[in-house]
Amino acid sequence: MLLPAFIVTFIFMYVPMYGIIIAFQDFNPALGFSGSPWVGLKWFKFIFNTPDFKNIFWNTFIIATSKMIFLQVVPILFALMLNEVMNRPLKRIVQTITYLPHFLSWVIIGGIFIDILSTKGIINQFLGVFGIDPIFFLGSNKYFQGTMVVTEVWREFGWASILYLAAIAGVNTDLYEAAYLEGAGRFRRMWHVTMPGIITTVILLLILNLSGVLNAGFEQILVFYNSAVFETGDILDTFVFRMGIQQAQFSLATAVGLFKSVIGLVLVIITRGVAHKTLGYRVF
């Protein structure tokens, strides 16, 4: 039963890794992998010497890290609160509503939020009631990164909570009964019974998420950003898109992609070691 999944993973994940050699070549599609001249670390040096690279890297890091933190914390809080809802029909309705945005493309969500967040949108109209001047959420470097984080969390927190809800369902109910008999209230039971029961799931997802710590969300940024917010909105993925696709600098784009992958791998290894040393937990 696992064989088809292994085959697909091998074909689409491991076989293309051969293309990493492009990062060390002046790649020419007409010459292919074997015929293109080798240039060593030329493209990596070019990247690090690019004037805008430092700013692009920090934009990527800030947006991606903020998303990772909030998409770890918000789903856990949501799962804990939803677990306390005793009305099953209401619980299912809330789950369904929060899952739905995950299945919408960023093109659709972008169109919705561009209207909502415009200077004449519903958010600014609401703020105007309190005498607050219109805010350029998508046209101001001050608010753009925060807007990206909030819209990402809104789209994904319901879907991300599924694993936490499943982990909570696996917690031994006898522990809740024992805590109740000892006089523990709902908050105490959540903190001292539920959280320790799902901590391994939290650590596992944290380690897995760290592999994408520099994935700030290409589709989302591409839909929302514009020339007015390049200073805070331009990320590694949009840089690769411009260089690799629009300007056909394949070697440069591959070098950036490899740089991202190496950073993710290093962070996963470090986090795995820390989790094992401090909590005695190992993913593999």
Image: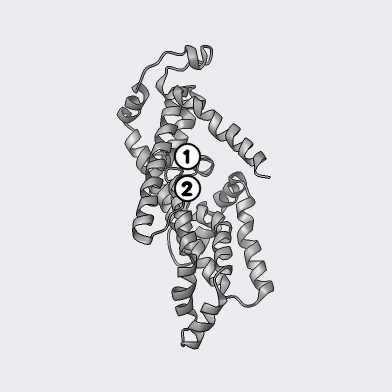
Q: Residue 226 shows which numbered tag?
A: 1
Residue drawn at x 45%, y 61% is 73
Residue 121 visible at all? no
Q: Position of residue 65 (x, y in %)?
A: 40, 50
Q: Position of residue 228 (x, y in %)?
A: 43, 40
Q: Residues within 10 Å of mark 2 (few under 14, many from 20)?
A: many
Judge by depth and name the residue closer to the eye, 142 or 179: 179
Marks 1 and 2 sit apart, C-alpha to C-alpha, by 8 Å
* Above or below 194: residue 151: above
Residue 215 visible at all? yes
Q: Residues within 10 Å of mark 1 (few under 14, many from 20)?
A: few
Residue drawn at x 35%, y 27% is 44
From the viewer's perspective, is 166 left or right of 24? Answer: right
From the viewer's perspective, is 18 left or right of 264? Answer: right
Judge by depth and name the residue closer to the eye, 198 or 66: 198
From the viewer's perspective, is 151 left or right of 264? Answer: right
Q: Amino acid at mark 1?
A: Asn
Q: In which quadrant of the rendered view does residue 262 lie? A: top left
Residue drawn at x 55%, y 29% is 15
Q: Identify the mark nearer the N-term, 1 or 2.
A: 2
Q: Position of residue 102 (x, y in %)?
A: 60, 53
Q: Amino acid at mark 2?
A: Leu
Please, which colouring scheme is shown? Answer: one colour
Q: Position of residue 210 (x, y in %)?
A: 43, 48
Badges 1 and 2: C-beta atoms under 8 Å apart? Answer: yes
| Callout 1 secondary element | loop
Q: Which residue is mark 2?
A: 138
| Callout 2 secondary element | loop
* Above or below 217: residue 258: above
From the viewer's perspective, is 273 left or right of 147? Answer: left
